[in-house]
Structure formats: structure tokens, C-alpha cells
Amino acid sequence: MDRRSFVRAVAKGAVAGGFASASVASRVLAQPRVGADLVFVSGVVVTMNARQPIAEAVAVRNGRIAAVGAGPDIEALRGPGTQVIDLGGKGLSPGLIDAHSHLAGFGQMELHFVNIRPPRVHSFESLRQVLAEAAAQRPRSEWIVARGFNEFDEGRFPMRQEIDPATPDNPALLIHWTGQYGIANTLGLQKANLLRADVADPYGGQYGRDRRTGLPNGLLQHYPAIYSVYQPQMTEAEEARAAEWACARFAAEGVTCVHDNFANQASAVQYVRSERAGRLPLRVRVYPYVWNLEHCRLVLTRMQRYSGPLVRLQGIKLAIDGYPLMYEVPARQEHLNIPMHPLDQFQAIVSAIHEAGLQVDVHAVGDRGVDITLDAFSRAAGGDRAVRDRRHRIEHYMFRREASIARTADMGVPVCVQPLHLVIRGDDLRRKFGRGLADALVPLASFRRAGVWTSLGADVPASPSHRPLDSIRSAMVRQTASGVQLDRSEAVSFLEALEAHTIAAAYASFDENELGSVEVGKCADLAVWNTDLTKVGPADIDRLQVVATYLAGKPTYQR
């Protein structure tokens, strides 16, 4: 079944309070009749299986789904030791998959960094107040790392001299909520030996400079510039706590798998240790990030091709842009419109990962960045259609360019987007790029019409919320933080958004035969909800809750 047929089948019947005809639920797809370990009965099961979109009951045996169908037939699979959960007409779905977040980074942000998100921080003065409070609680010379700032009332980012009064004795590094921009104070630049007019910009990044002196002014663009100032490290124990803290938060939202698209060696090792110690409540697909061609070759040479019960090395991540790499940008933003790699180096990195037999995962926000990435995939694979089997994927892909979307579908390139960016970036991007371009941000409906496999991810800590329901609400409502209504034609229904958090996300990591739908033989990764999911509209999202989360038939969260 092709992508378009699957989408039509899954979405069919999501009107008049029904997801599919009652006759579908009367059929049972089952393994041989043996006693089940666990059965869910009297529910509305949204399966994300086009052949059987809805059911009443599910049986689980040995961590896998043993049967899906009508209540009486599933009841017949009960044995003396079977646990029975009566859903009472409430919802059951596949466990959710977050296709783009950073577990250890999320934990590090919340447990170790100073929080400078709006609305608490919205002006230079409010920023200085928070930094001064943090400095008062630390010894002199200890680094202050803060993250989460967005736009300021002053209409620009502060320079080092404007944060120095709050941090006179502590080096400080402030990171934008996206992770793409930073600000260092004077002491921070001095400790990194960067406060020199002759300092060269790092590969893939830029230092802002004072026009008169040529000295860095504290503004940092892209990861290489930010982390050349200071790269916060966690101990092994801190790494474990951060990752497990984040996993628990995701499990409480019905999430049973996360794709970590910016993993470093320490976090990847910690996922495996937590898996082996039985402390990992979800599955993790690991995509180590590479900074340049030399680093890519080093990672490919040294990394272990690990595949365990819950954790798997899936591919390699790189970026072509941070600020959206666009065909057209306002003149005042042109200095930011730069690729993170020379194009020949970018191609070489993509080709190296492809030739190593791994999935290539590219951060490409802007329309030009997307086209450069598609070209690189095609060259590495030997043609557009040859990319399909490899599923090289694109992260973020925020702008609607019809020809690029059609080519993405033809190449079979999965896309992962973040609808919450409509809220937290929509107003700013409308100011920068104008209504015509910005109102069609995150073009989910266009992706679906074209047949692009599209998944959702929270992208924490580069986002204020890890909750899938916040992403789903944004995809349905499409409003900015100030309440501006963006292009409604790109809105999707609840069930379409749920599909992007289940089977489509499974497809993005070659997991569709094991995860993402409630089908016989698949892993019993499930989410129990407090209501019938076939009746959820935009007004119902705030009342919707996950009641329990199951990983391989075992509860990882219960409300």
C-alpha cells in the first residue's frame, strides 16, 4: 500500500464521531489462541493499521500484540493469569514516538542550566536580574550556563557589555532556545581566549564583532561558535540522571520511543547502560551529531553499531543551516543566511554516511537548505529514486515550496517537523519574512497531500514543551503566540497528527514493522487515554490525558 492510500485509509471515517465502521471491529486479527498476559477490553482502539483502523479490544502476550478485534473474541484469550483492563469506552492507541528530541540535553537544561525563557526573561533588565541571582549562588569563576532566551523588548540580542554588570566575576554563556545562537560575557570570551581582533571564525559558525575594534562582541552564531566558548560537561552520574529524568517525563505523556538526533558519545553510552540496568522506560534511536568531515570520519571509524532491545544506533546527524538558509531573505538578515558547511564538504559528509550504510539525518530549516540537502542525498545514492530505500531524512523543513515537497515525496525522504514552532517562532518569522512566506510555515497538509512520510518531534530542549499534545494542538490550530491565525489550509486533524506521532514516526527510523501501530506481532507499546480519541477536536486537547503507558506490555507510567 502506498503512502497516499495509507493516509486515506487511516483518516477515513473521522467524522460524525466515528473512526471506522463498527463492522471492522468485529473482525479479529490474532495469533494462535493461547492465554494472554494482558488484555484491554471495552475500549476504542485507534490502531493506525489501515486494514483494521479501529477495534474494541487487544490481547498481549510476551510483550507483543497477540490479537486485535472485538471484545468477546479477545475475552476468549483470557487465561488464569491474564490481567484484564476495562477501558470503559476510553481510548487506546499505539505508544507515541517523538521523532526529534534530545533526552540527555533536555535533562541537562532543566536540571543544570539557568532558565531564561520568556515570559520571565523578555528584556535586557529582566535578563540581568536572573543572571545576577544565579551569580550570587555560585562561587567566583564558576561558569554560568543559561538557556531559553528568545526575542527581547529591545528588538535585538544583548552584547557582552550589556550582561557584564550582572556577571562581573563569573564567565557566562547564554544559549538561545533554538540552540543556534548564543551570547558570551566578556569574562567568558577571555577564558576561552577569544577576545582578540585576529580570532578566526570557527568552521560552520561566526562571532559577532564590534565594527570599530573588530573584537568579538559576545554574539555567537551556530553550534561551533557557541561551544568554542564553553561546552558544559556532565559527570557519568549526572548524565544518567539527566537522561532518565527526561525519559520519565516523556513516558508520562504516552511516549514509548524517542529519536535523539543530537546524541554525543556520553549520552549514547548512558542509554545503553540504563537499558542494561532496566531503568529505561522507552526506546531510543540514536543519531550522533557530526561537526565536519573529519569528525564524521572519526565517528564512523570508532563508533559501535549497537542494536539492543531498546536502544539502537540508527544514523548520523548533521546540519546545513541554523538560521533558515533561504533563497530570499531581508537584506538586514543576509549576513545570517550562510550554510554551515561549504557545499563540497557537505556533500562529502552525506556521501560518507551513505556509503557506511547508515541513515543520513539533516537539519535543514530553510527552502534553499532543503534543496541542497535533497541534491546531496541524490548524488550520494546515485539518483533521486535510489534514495527511497535508504530513507535519508530531513529535520524541521519549515517552509512550503511545492516543487521541493513533490521531490521529497518522490525520493521517499521522511520529514520531521515541530508544529510548536508556529507558536514560538511564528510572530518573529512573520516580521522577518512577511505574511506570504511565514503563514505557510510547517506545511503539514501539503506534505500529506504530496505523500511525504511526516513525523512530529518536540525538539526539547530547543522547545519549551516536550508534550506531544502541545505539538498536536499547534498542528491543528496554527496560531502564533500573539494569536495570529496562520494559513488554515495547512492544518490537520487530531487523528492525522496522531498518525505523525505513531506509524509515520516509526517509518522514519525503519521501525514500522515493529512499532507505530496496534497490529498482531508488533511490540505492545501502547498509550491509554481518558477519552475516545475518535471524538477529539481542537477544543478537547486541554482535557485529553494519558492514563497509562505500556512498553512491551509492561506499565512505564500510570496516572
Image (cartoon, rainbow, N blue to C red):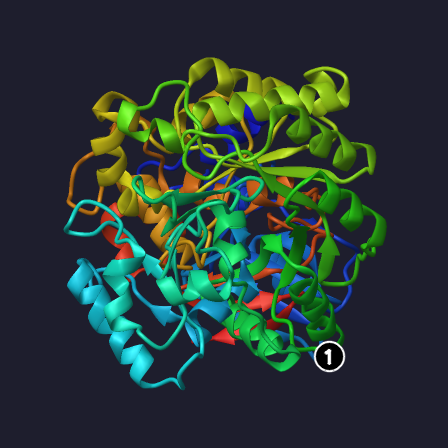
Residue 353 on image: x %, y %: 75, 37
Left or right? Give the position of 50 relative to 274.
Answer: left
The residue at which mark 1 appears reads as 277
Left or right? Give the position of 299 relative to 488.
Answer: right
- Quadrant of the rendering where the C terminus is positioned: bottom left
Of 337 and 120, the residue lying toward us: 337
Q: Residue at x 39, y 53 (%)?
A: 182
Of 332 and 256, the residue lying toward us: 332
Residue 6 on image: x %, y %: 56, 30
Answer above or below: position of 422 versus 158: above
- Quadrant of the rendering where the N terminus is positioned: top right
Residue 462 on image: x %, y %: 42, 54
Residue 530 in view: no
Answer above or below: position of 205 versus 348: below
Tell me if mark 1 has few (under 14), some (14-19) or many (20+) residues whose alpha carbon lies within 10 angstroms of its own: few
Left or right? Give the position of 22 relative to 266.
Answer: left
Choose top left, top right, bottom left or bottom right for residue 408.
Answer: top right
Of 177 and 548, the residue lying toward us: 177
Residue 376 on image: x %, y %: 65, 23
Left or right? Give the position of 220 relative to 428.
Answer: right
Q: Residue at x 16, y 38 (%)?
A: 484
